[in-house]
């Protein structure tokens, strides 16, 4: 049985997720249950007691580093922040005794029997392998003949980003590596619609996914931080995270921590990320609301009596039809929706859209994007 070390490669960007990954690496996109995409990889490795696991990420991901170190603080999972992804990968490919190297890109939602996978990989004979699902979707590479890999990779003189390095490496090594077909479920996370659909599926089939979603080390929740459903609030077929307060009606939805649903408000078939306050009498349906940058104020950021995600589900967003379609509306980070505003389906309200852009409007039509004043990009 061979020993091998594991490298989890943090994926940085995903343009099709728009505001969902605007300041968050793709690997840290939040999922039902309070974990992140990367927890679907690190959680099982942590539980299995793997002693040689390294997370490699761009040096401009300080919050990602803090998240991993905080969640997996035993020392068994190490974090390597690199200024040059090409140099980092080249260093990993240098021959080291007879150990093998398992490289995993933490970018998509993966559900697998990790105990069985590690057993199969440990028994595999010497060689280089691409690990794929039965649908031929690649999700890992097992390497042992590393003395030849630098040539396959074609290391460039210039520095490449995390995602470019991985994509180029995969394209090269897949041409010569032998396949290992393993029964696993891999869900691509490329667009806003993908994210919404996956979130709704996880919520409806939580029992099926619970083992993986909750495999990361749990954080203690104080009694006063538990979710509260206050009269006359009602919750049906939904996942409500800690520190949420529901005074209205929630159905078929996912609420992340520190979400408040005001009296007579309704949240239906939606994903509401952390620190949002749905005002009294507001209706949110078929919508993803990204997190607020800070804890919500006393007043709601989704205005009293506003209505989001109504009308016909056909069509797509006019500006981003390949990313937002199927009747899904996306509200970006730290957005304040004015009182009484109506926003139809397939709409996009970019992050930090100024309230002045809603002035003189009482409705955002289906498929429209509010033209925000773009600020200087903040790393991560």
Image (tube, rainbow, N blue to C red):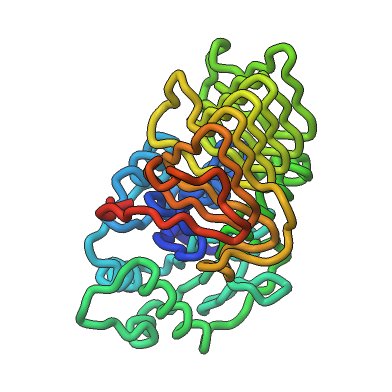
Quarter that holds the N terminus: bottom right
Q: Where 261 sits versus 376, above or below? A: above
Across and down, in percent, residue 28 comes to 46, 49
Q: Where 43 sits versus 280, above or below? A: below
Q: Quadrant of residue 213?
A: top right
Q: Nearer the viewer, residue 190 or 91?
A: 190
Q: Quadrant of residue 335?
A: top left
Q: Residue furthest front?
A: 360
Q: Nearer the viewer, residue 296 or 102?
A: 296
What residue is at 68 percent from the left and 73 percent from the top?
A: 181
Q: Where 330 sits versus 121, above or below? A: above
Using the rendered image of the protein, determine whether residue 73 is visible from the camera's viewpoint.
no
Q: Nearer the viewer, residue 223 or 361?
A: 361
Q: Is residue 316 left or right of residue 107?
A: right
Across and down, in percent, residue 241 comes to 61, 29
Q: Quadrant of residue 229?
A: top right
Across and down, in percent, residue 46 comes to 52, 43
Across and down, in percent, residue 222 comes to 53, 14
Q: Is residue 130 left or right of residue 291?
A: right
């Amino acid at each position: 049985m061979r020993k091998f070390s594991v490298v989890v490669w943090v994926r940085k960007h995903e343009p099709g997720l728009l505001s969902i990954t605007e300041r968050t690496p793709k690997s840290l996109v939040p999922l039902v249950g309070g974990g992140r995409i990367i927890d679907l990889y690190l959680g099982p490795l942590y539980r299995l007691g793997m002693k040689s696991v390294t997370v490699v990420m761009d040096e401009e991901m300080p919050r990602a580093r803090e998240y991993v170190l905080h969640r997996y603080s035993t020392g068994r999972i190490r974090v390597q922040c690199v200024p040059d992804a090409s140099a980092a990968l080249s260093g990993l490919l240098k021959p080291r005794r007879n150990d093998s190297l398992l490289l995993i890109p933490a970018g998509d939602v993966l559900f697998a029997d990790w105990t069985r996978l590690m057993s199969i990989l440990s028994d595999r004979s010497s060689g280089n392998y691409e690990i794929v699902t039965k649908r031929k979707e690649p999700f890992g590479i097992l390497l042992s003949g590393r003395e030849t890999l630098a040539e396959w990779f074609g290391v460039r003189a210039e520095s490449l980003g995390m995602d470019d390095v991985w994509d180029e490496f995969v394209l090269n090594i897949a041409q010569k590596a032998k396949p290992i077909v393993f029964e696993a479920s891999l869900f691509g996370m490329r667009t806003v619609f993908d994210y919404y659909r996956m979130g709704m599926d996880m919520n409806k089939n939580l029992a099926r996914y619970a083992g993986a979603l909750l495999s990361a080390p749990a954080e203690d929740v104080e009694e006063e931080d538990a979710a509260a459903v206050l009269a006359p609030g009602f919750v049906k077929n939904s996942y409500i995270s800690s520190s949420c307060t529901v005074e209205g009606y929630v159905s078929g939805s996912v609420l992340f921590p520190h979400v408040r649903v005001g009296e007579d408000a309704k949240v239906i078939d939606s994903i509401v990320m952390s620190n949002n306050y749905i005002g009294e009498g507001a209706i949110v349906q078929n919508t993803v609301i990204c997190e607020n940058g800070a804890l919500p104020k006393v007043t709601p950021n989704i205005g009293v009596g506003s209505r989001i995600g109504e009308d016909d589900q056909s069509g797509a967003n006019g500006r981003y039809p390949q990313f937002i379609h199927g009747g899904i509306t996306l509200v970006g980070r730290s957005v304040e929706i004015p009182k009484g505003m109506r926003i139809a389906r397939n709409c996009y309200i970019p992050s930090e859209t100024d309230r002045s852009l809603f002035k003189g409007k009482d409705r955002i039509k289906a498929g429209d994007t509010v033209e925000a004043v773009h600020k200087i990009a903040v790393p991560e």
